[in-house]
Image (cartoon, helix red, strand yellow):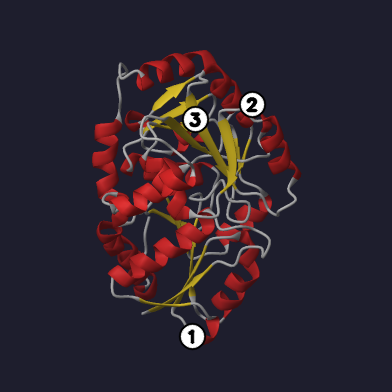
Amino acid sequence: MKVLVHYSPSPCLEVFEGARLRKTIKALCEKAGIAWVDSPLSKPDIAHFISTRDEAKLRDLKEVGVKTVVSAFYCEHDPDARLLKVKDDGSIILPKKSRRFLESADLILVPSKKVKAFCAEIGLSSRVEVLRPSLFSYLYSEPESELNAGLRYFAIKPEDKVCLTLGSYKNLKGVKTLYEIARRLPEVRFFFFGAPRHQGSLSYSLACATAPANCRVYRLNSGDLFRSLLAHSSAYLITDPAPDFIGTAEAFASSAQVVAVGPNALKRLSDWDDLYLSYSNVEEAVKYLEKLYAGEANETIMPAASFAKTLSVSKQAANLAAYYSSLLEGENHD
């Protein structure tokens, strides 16, 4: 079996969730003993895609008999890998372009049972199966030297109270919620990461210009530094309505308390309701975070960290291999 793992983001787009997912798929293949390639000229048996940018390539390969797979809804903060449109109230829309791309594939892999149910609700015609987000082993036991790299880069002292968040600079409501929480917790250092399409992004510049003094805004161009910072964060805050599967799973593994504020598609689409806390407004979230940083809050860190261990690449590789094999063997699935 030979698998083409393809994702080619815009040359202007910095490394983000799509690239992270591509790396994970390759790692799953390696763990399962499956050869992966980067070029269609290598005559793959299966082609695995992430972005609607590659719809034409998917169709071309399918026409010559290559089985096609799409990983869907894992990367909804990535401008080139997102498939959904999520409104401020958390309602979800699948654009026509995304539907066409997904229905062109022989198999769609999704991160949860609720997402699979969502696909059935909207009438997707392709086969849909669940492959939960996969995590690398270093997330559970990263060397101290690597963890300290983030402390040095961001000038964090051991006693600093840190809160990390991931989102879209264009989602003004989510940014406003984050900044309001940061202003009410001046003793906490907030770090906001996102993915602008280019260096001159107006939304990124605006997010930087309006951020409170205790909130720093960064482009996510180093996964290592991001994870190092996450390991030193007491809280991982979600204020963007888009479902955040990869970031949330990494927060679970890093023992950061995940706190969602306001309408969020993660609640509808994930199977993780018992593993994070959700608050309807800023006031409730601030009260909880005050208790968390004072060491007085109830937490979901322990069950979340335990769950994260089930998402390791070593444990997930066999599941992906089984899905690939079923495609080549022509099995029928309900």
* Of pointers 3 and 1, the one earlier in the residue sequence: 1
Nearer to us of marks 2 and 1 is 2
Residue 11, given in percent of the width and then of the height, sits at: 67, 65
Can you identify the residue that label 1 sits on? 43
| Structural crowding at the residue carrying mark 1, measured as other residues with C-alpha within 10 Å and reported as few (<14), some (14–19) or many (≥20) | some
Quadrant showing the C terminus: bottom left
Q: Can I make out residue 97 in this image? A: yes
Can you identify the residue that label 3 sits on? 189
What amino acid does circle 1 point to? Lys
Q: Nearer the viewer, residue 140 or 151?
A: 151
Query: How far is disc 3 from disc 1 in space, using C-alphas?
Result: 50 Å
Q: Nearer the viewer, residue 16 or 4?
A: 16
Q: Nearer the viewer, residue 28 or 87?
A: 28
Residue 171, given in percent of the width and then of the height, sits at: 65, 35
| Structural crowding at the residue carrying mark 3, measured as other residues with C-alpha within 10 Å and reported as few (<14), some (14–19) or many (≥20) | some
Q: Determine the secondary structure under disc 1.
A: loop
| Structural crowding at the residue carrying mark 2, measured as other residues with C-alpha within 10 Å and reported as few (<14), some (14–19) or many (≥20) | some
What amino acid does circle 3 point to? Arg
Q: 20 above or below 31? A: above
Q: 85 above or below 199? A: above
* Of pointers 3 and 2, the one earlier in the residue sequence: 2
Left or right: residue 142 versus residue 196 is left
Residue 2, given in percent of the width and then of the height, sits at: 40, 80
Residue 179, given in percent of the width and then of the height, sits at: 60, 26
Q: Residue at x 35, y 53 (%)?
A: 146
Left or right: residue 311 versus residue 10 is left
Left or right: residue 27 versus residue 194 is left
What amino acid does circle 2 point to? Lys
